[in-house]
Image (cartoon, rainbow, N blue to C red):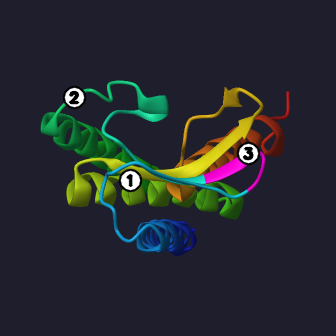
Amino acid sequence: MWRRGLAAAFLVALLDQLSKWGVRTYFADSGCVPQRQRISSFFDLVVTCNRGMSFGLFNDGGGLNALVFSLVAAAIILLLIFWLSRVSSPFLAIAIGFIVGGAAGNVIDRLRFGAVVDFLYFHLGSWYWPAFNLADSAISVGVVAMLIDGLLLHKEAH
């Protein structure tokens, strides 16, 4: 399971970085200058840099945020890899791999740019969901898969 989880992590991190490179290239590598291109009535392609945590929390912090959040994410990645080394379920191994790969993709951004590059921006009328990226999506899918694994796939006999 170790290899399966690490392969999923590598693939997620690679696709995340490639997607961010593609968006930055589309917007002529604008760095962290906000950019926006309407794609449909409910979706915009954007470039925005999140120096904080999820949903832009603590986004006002300076360069110290990148270091602190990178160190926290690295510690979480190490714990998840240790857990991955003990997993026997292919489903759980891939779920953990998704989380590790997503976290690694965002750490790479923090180390390269001092912030996480987000580019998917969905909205409905005046309701807007915070911009996110492929790494964020992979982390969310991994967490949901872990919940499914823990709650539904491993029923203990009483």
- Residue at screen point 78% across, 47% down: 41
Identity, as a three-letter code, of the amino acid under mark 2: Gly
User: Which stretch is magenta?
Assistant: 40-44
* Residue bearing mark 3: 149
For residue 12, side relative to residue 21 (left or right): right
Q: 96 or 43, which lies in front?
A: 43
Mark in the foreground, 1 or 2? 2
Main secondary structure type of the part rendered in magenta? loop
Q: Give the residue at mark 1.
A: 106
Tag 3: amino acid: Asp
Q: Nearer the viewer, mark 2 or mark 3?
A: 2
The residue at the point 51 percent across, 55 percent down is 135
Comes first in the chain, label 1 or label 2: 2
Relative to 145, does residue 18 appear above or below in the rendering? below
Q: Secondary structure at mark 3?
A: helix
Dot 2: what SS? loop
